[in-house]
Structure formats: C-alpha cells, structure tokens
Amino acid sequence: MAPKTAKKATGEGANVFSMFEQAQIEEFKEAFSIMDQNRDGLIDKNDLRETFSALGRMNVKQEEIDEMLKEAPGPINFTVFLTMFGEKLRGADPEDTILSAFRVFDPEGTGILKKEFITEILTTQAERFSPVEMEQMFTAFPPDVAGNLDYKNLVYIITHGDEKDQE
C-alpha cells in the first residue's frame, strides 16, 4: 500500500509542477523556506506560529492555526504547499493573486502595511529589492504621513493602470 501512496504523490506532484512556470516555482520555494522556520521540510503548527510572530501577530489562536492546517490533505511538504496554492490560484485573476500575496502580511485585512515592514520584507526575502528599487516604488506609490502603504490601491494601479494615465 505504501508504494501506491508514493506513486500517487509523485503523479500529483508532476501535475502541480506543470501548472507553474519555473520562476514561479522558485518563488514558492523561497516562500516555503521562509515559513519552514525549523528547516525540517514541513510546515507545522510551530512554523506557522513563528511565521505569524515574525509578521508581528503574536496572539494567534491555536484553533486558527489548526483550521489552516486542516486545509492540507496531510503534512505540508513543498509539493503539498504548491498544490494548495495551485488550487487557490486556479481561475484567479492577476489582481486577486497579487492581493492574496499582500494579505499574507496583513492578517487583520486592514489593506495597509507599514513602509518599514514592506522595506524589510522586500530587501531581505526572495528576490531582494535594491535600495534604488525601493526608492522608485515609494516614489511611485508613496506611503501616507503615518508611513502606511495602501497596498489595495497599489495592486489596483498595477493591474488597471493609474486613472491619470487614462486621460
């Protein structure tokens, strides 16, 4: 029975890997490695709690973490992680996809993120932004006086264009 399970997992993996371009798979690998805090190849309760903590959300209820883990068919290795994203993104338009990426860092759903936090994430994780790229982004999409970046507006402009450009 174990070989069937292994074969099934391999078959599912081949399908999910064909859903994404190689560059996207590399980005998912980086996201997975950021979340896999203990580097054991699986995302578990402790990894999720530490990820939330790193995002500034300290008091996540155990039930909330358990609900997240229930979405997976079993232990969350990279293939399961990729499959889950594939299922969530299937049929999603680019605006929803980009908003979903930002929402990972905004669990309360405020629609804004601190400039310092965005700078920290974009300059230290995944494909790192250079200081020049960060300056260009904040020039094009300046935060408010409190240092908040309205990422919902940013995503709308990225996917629909700026209204001023339409005139």
Image: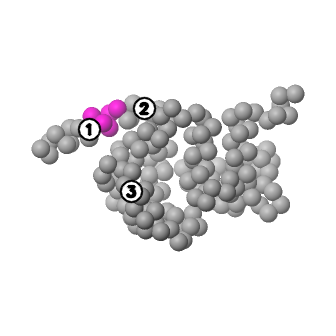
Residue 70 visible, this orientation: yes
**Where does residue 82 sit, x and y in percent of width and height?**
41, 43
Identify the amino acid type marked 2. Met
Identify the amino acid type marked 3. Leu
Q: Residue at x 74, y 58 (%)?
A: 148
Identify the amino acid type marked 1. Thr
Q: Residue at x 26, y 41 (%)?
A: 9
Q: Secondary structure at mark 1?
A: helix
Kindly report the distance in space between the C-alpha atoms of the residues bearing marks 2 and 3.
23 Å
Is 40 included in the stretch rendered in magenta?
Answer: no
Q: Residues within 10 Å of mark 2 (few under 14, many from 20)?
A: some
**Where does residue 71 sit, x and y in percent of width and height?**
39, 51
Q: Determine which residue is flagged by label 3.
A: 69
Q: In the picture shown, does residue 132 fall above or below 45?
A: above
Question: In front here: 73 or 51?
Answer: 73
Q: Residue at x 40, y 47 (%)?
A: 81
Kindly report the distance in space between the C-alpha atoms of the residues bearing marks 3 and 1.
21 Å
Q: Determine which residue is flagged by label 2.
A: 19
Q: Residues within 10 Å of mark 3 (few under 14, many from 20)?
A: some
Q: Which residues are magenta?
A: 11-15
